[in-house]
Structure formats: C-alpha cells, structure tokens
Amino acid sequence: MEITRRQALRTTGLLSGAVLLGSTALGTQTPANASESGWRWCQKCEGLWFSNGSGRGICMAGPGVGHSTENSGYYTMLAIGEEIGASQPGWSRCQACQGLYYSGAGRSGSCAATLSGSGGHYQAKSGYSLEYAGQNDAQEHRQPGWRWCDKCELLWFGARATFAGNHLWNGAARDQCPRDVLGHRYYDYNANYRVPHVGLAA
C-alpha cells in the first residue's frame, strides 16, 4: 500500500503546523515516462542532481561552480510504474538548481538559484517516483539512506550526516539547505528512500 507524504504528516499530527511555501512554479515541464540516467550525488550539498543538462546547476554549498560529481556513482530516476515494491510518486527536477525535489504536496520549497533560497524550485520535469528502502536494497542495486528535507523539499543523502537536534551537521558546512543556514532537516517520520545506483558509493 502506497503511503503519501500527506498521510504520513497527518499520522504524526504535524500537518496542521506545516508551513506552505507557495505553489509549485511551473516551467516547460515534461512528464517522466521512462527511467532516466544521468543523475549524480553532490558531495558538497549532499543533493541528487541531474548532470545531463546544460551546466552543473546551482549548489548551495558553493563555491560558484555548480554541483560536484567527485566521488559520485551513477544514479537512475524511475518513472511511475517502474518501481520495485512500495514507492512514492510526486518528485520533480528543478530547472534552475537541477536538484530532485518533492512537488507532490503543491509546495515549491526553496531553490539555491534564488537569492538566499527565498524563491521556490522551477519545475522542469515531473513524474519521478522514489522507492522506500527495504531488505533487498543491495540485491536490487539500490542505495538506501536518502532523505527528504521538509524546508527546501530536496532529496539529500543522509547516511553520512550527523545531527544537531533535527538539523544536518556535516563538519563546517552547515549551509547545505537553501532555506537557511541550519542545514537540511530530518524527522523520524521522514521516509528512508533508495535510488538505483552503480559505480562509486556516495
């Protein structure tokens, strides 16, 4: 049975306190109808980003050279219907920062391409689906440990992170969330996602 993020928030009693950051900005969006390669992990901001576009997007962790491919393997995003097991649809790619963010609740989050992350993501492609992590991750060539930040809406790799309260703390780099300087935020109700992956482990 598929569990939506809205249902998860309602279950924990946090839906009423959620702050809506505005409706999703729509670009020249193209629904994903097949799996898509070309996704990489950025070791600076911990985000998953699309590397087969023009340029390297915008990385909040800087410096101003876009996202990094250093030490990253190769990831594939799945279209709805290609998943193995329980999954969550409603993910999109931002045309500005090239990151993968959750658009299923109608919020645009915060994008690193705008001044201090004050503006939302600009939807370039929608229709991606993420699988929930499970027992057969290694056999199915999936990498678990991916999390959703409820502030910027981006997917980020949390397996390397330590936390100060509910916020990511990764050495001196605490500016990885475009929303504020506290870093990506994680709660126990945030799902643990997995992403198809080959090559170097992030």
Image (cartoon, helix red, strand yellow):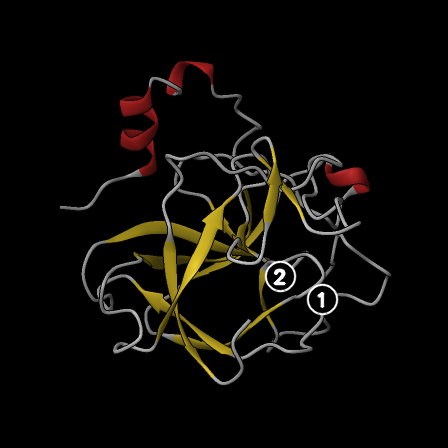
Check disc 1 and give the amino acid type.
His
The location of residue 42, given as percent across then percent down, is 65, 66
The location of residue 156, given as percent across then percent down, is 54, 54
In this view, the residue farthest toward the top is: 16
Residue plotted at (19% across, 46% down): 2
- Of residue 74 and residue 91, the one placed in the foreground of this image is 74
Give the position of the C terminus as an image quadrant.
bottom right
Residue plotted at (52% across, 32% down): 23
- Of residue 66 and residue 47, the one placed in the foreground of this image is 47
Tag 1 and tag 2, C-beta contact below 8 Å: yes
Q: Which mark is residue 67?
A: 1
Q: Pick whichever of labels 1 and 2 is earlier in the sequence.
A: 1
Is 151 left or right of 13, judged from the image as shown? right
Q: Which mark is residue 139?
A: none
The location of residue 100, given as percent across then percent down, is 52, 56
Check disc 2 and give the amino acid type.
Gln
In this view, the residue farthest toward the bottom is: 199
- Asked where in the image residue 130 lies, by quadrant, the reply is bottom left
Secondary element under disc 1, as helix, strand or loop, is loop
Is 139 left or right of 22, judged from the image as shown? left
**Which residue is denoted by mark 2 in the rendering?**
98
Q: Badge 2, how many Cα within 10 Å: few under 14, some, many 20+?
A: many
Image: 5 above or below 85? above
